[in-house]
Image (spheres, grey):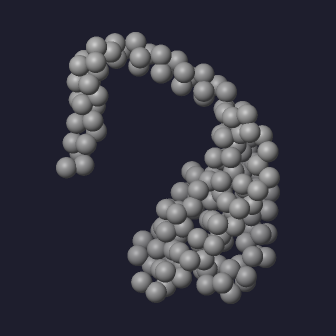
Amino acid sequence: MSNYILPILFLFLILYCIYKKINTYDHFVKGAKGAIKLVVEIFPFIASILIAVALLRVSGITSFLVKIISPVFKLLGIPPQLCELIILRPFTGSGSYGILENIFSTYGADSYISRCASVIMGCSETIFYVATIYISQTKVKKLLYAIPVALFCSFVGTIIACLLCRVI
């Protein structure tokens, strides 16, 4: 059934546009032009966050943070093997998926650690990436409380995710 959802939605959209007498091709081209403009505007922000993540990993800062934080995480019920994932997830989505794949191949897809990592990936967000895109596209430039609150909530969600994976 899921294979048919997108074609059905696409067909419905075309039929709706025909019914409303909307020139779909012109609107599609107009939207594509807007998308190109958007990509050009946000590219510097995306590039800067990707460079920052690469520098964190290459410099060894993440390894250093993992050594320091893992005992605290273990005390909170979070497997120490997930430290790097938890540290990098607020910064990068693709980097976190790479770490998740490594966790799957190391510990197996159905292990406790892999289940925790999957839930963490599913219920957390790339906070700094989203904030970067948001700042680049709005007039709001002061995110005084937004980022700390988002990081705190993400961390609490991580603790609860690991607790639930242990119980279930």
Between residue 37 and residue 101, name the one nearer to us: 37
Q: Position of residue 24 (x, y in %)?
A: 34, 17
Q: Position of residue 39 (x, y in %)?
A: 60, 28
Residue at figure coordinates x 73%, y 72% from the top left: 66
Residue at figure coordinates x 41%, y 19% from the top left: 28
| Residue 106 in sight from this viewpoint | no
- Counting every numbered tag in the picture gives 0
- Name above or below for residue 6 compared with residue 106: above
Q: Left of 112 or right of it: where is 7?
A: left
Q: Position of residue 166 (x, y in %)?
A: 49, 85
The answer to which quarter of the image holds residue 27 is: top left
Residue at figure coordinates x 60%, y 22% from the top left: 37
The answer to which quarter of the image holds residue 12 is: top left
The quadrant of the image that shows the C terminus is bottom left
- Name above or below for residue 89 compared with residue 140: below
Residue at figure coordinates x 28%, y 14% from the top left: 21
- Name above or below for residue 78 compared with residue 119: below
Which residue reaches farthest front?
20
Q: Left of 143 or right of it: where is 121?
A: left
Between residue 118 and residue 101, name the one nearer to us: 118
Q: Position of residue 11 (x, y in %)?
A: 23, 29
The answer to which quarter of the image holds residue 26 is: top left
Q: Left of 3 or right of it: where is 160?
A: right
Q: Left of 106 or right of it: where is 60?
A: right
| Residue 123 in sight from this viewpoint | yes
